[in-house]
Image (spheres, helix red, strand yellow):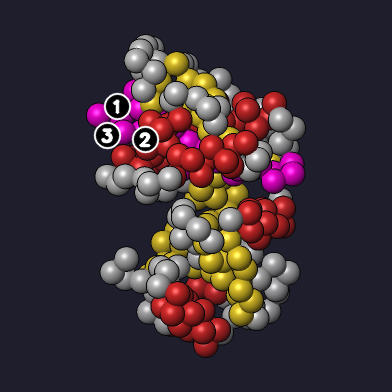
Amino acid sequence: MLKQIETYYDTVPRSSARAEAFGPLTLFVQEGRGWPYYARPTLGHEGEVSAGAVEDVRSRQRELGVPEAFEWVAETTPGLRAAVEATGLTVHEHPLMVLAGEPLAVPGPEGFTVRMVRPDDPALESAVAAPYAAFGEEPQPGTAARIAERITGGLTRLAAALDGSGNALAAGQHQPVGAVSEVVGVGTVPAARRRGLGLAVTAALVADARAHGTELVFLTASDADVARLYGRLGFRTVATALIAEAPDA
């Protein structure tokens, strides 16, 4: 299972980023607009990763003007944490969760419609904006158009919880690659939290992934409390996702 996830992690950024090789590490560099990427262990590398290799990548990230960020699975590359921390980066732990069997049913939120969003959907703009608003941010100009292109190309699937006016108050995506898909970017605008919208959106994404033949659905929870919420859908923690960034990031 973790090998499938590692292959997925190596594949999914390549639809919008170029990969630069640094021996045991691979740096993904966003091409065009969108979230900046990160460095990961090179697929198939089984040896140690030195602090010097991490510094080489960080130097390149500074040169490019992108965040000095690394992501990996603790159980797959156990020695990387020490190397990363030796260079001064801060490492955060997050539960890596996989759906065990079929998803469990959760009640739909009253007064809201939860559905998939098409590329030409009137709700697209608000569905793209909702997860940004969850973190007090706004999407860059052209983000909705880029997501629409990814939906059209089969790279992204978008679900949203809509109020009676058709405005999205929560949304999220899953990104299928073959028989594997990751649920990402689920967020609810602050004024609509604690109504079960995020969980309902996640359930819709899982149902859509299963309907399109996805066998392995996984996600990374922000913390243990959020992991317990995803557990209500049948997700279980199988490993620890690690994210490293500069202390002032």
Quadrant of the drawing holding the C terminus: bottom left
Determine whether 103 is above or below 2 in the image.
above
Q: Residue at x 57, y 41 (%)?
A: 149
Q: Which residues are magenta?
A: 169-196
Residue corresponding to mark 2:
130
- Count of labels shown? 3
Tell whether label 3 touches label 1 (CB within 8 Å): yes
Residue corresponding to mark 3:
190
Q: Earlier in the sequence, mark 1 or mark 2?
A: 2
In the visual, does 135 lie left or right of 238?
Answer: left
In the visual, does 143 lie left or right of 214?
Answer: left
Q: Main secondary structure of the magenta part?
A: strand
Front: mark 2 or 3: 2
Q: Which mark is residue 192?
A: 1
Q: Which mark is residue 141?
A: none
Determine whether 180 is above or below 61 in the image.
above
* Residue 94 rendering spot, x and y as whole percentages: 46, 53
Q: Residue at x 67, y 53 (%)?
A: 8
Distance, label 1 to label 2, CA atoms, is 10 Å
